[in-house]
Image: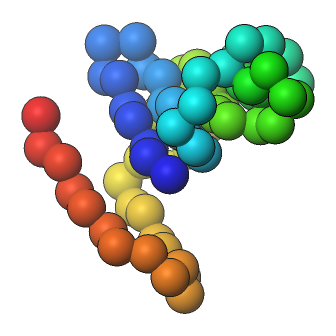
């Protein structure tokens, strides 16, 4: 899973799996779900992210994962 913030558009994209989405559904204004060809949720797009979520803190609790931080 990857969280990608795009400051130029103030959007946050959460990649749940590395498969392309083929269908997008807006579930509320500015919140879109991407689904693959099998109908499996593959990503979440949040427009105006800085007003919808706290971008200053990310807490991972009991995830059995390796954490990587990328600076760009």
Is any atom of residue 48 visible in this view?
A: yes
Quarter location, residue 27: top right
x and y percentages locating residue 21 in the rendered image: 67, 20
Q: Is residue 9 above or below residue 6?
A: above
Residue 48 in the image: x percent, y percent? 54, 22
Among all residues in the image, which is located at the extreme left?
72
Residue positioned most to the front? 38
Q: Is residue 9 left or right of residue 28?
A: left
- Residue located 35% across and 23% down the image: 6
- Percent position (x, y) of residue 63? 53, 79
Point 39% across, 35% down: residue: 4
Q: Position of residue 11 (x, y in %)?
A: 48, 23
Camera-nearest residue between 54 and 63: 63
Asked whether, in this view, residue 32 is left or right of residue 51, the answer is right
* Residue at horizontal 43 percent and vertical 63 percent from the top: 58
- Is 60 in front, or is 54? 60
Instruction: Please say whether residue 29 is visible from this viewpoint.
Output: no
| Relative horizontal placement of residue 67, taking residue 13 as reference (left or right) | left
| Left or right of residue 66: residue 51 | right
Q: Quadrant of the C terminus?
A: top left
Quarter of the view holding residue 23: top right
Q: Residue at x 31, y 22 (%)?
A: 7
């Amino acid at each position: 899973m990857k969280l990608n913030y795009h400051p130029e558009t103030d959007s946050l994209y959460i990649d749940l799996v590395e498969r392309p989405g083929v269908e997008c559904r807006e579930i509320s204004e500015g919140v879109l779900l991407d689904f693959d060809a099998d109908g499996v949720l593959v990503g979440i797009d949040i427009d105006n992210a800085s007003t919808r979520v706290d971008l200053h803190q990310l807490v991972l609790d009991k995830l059995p994962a390796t954490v990587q931080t990328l600076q760009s």
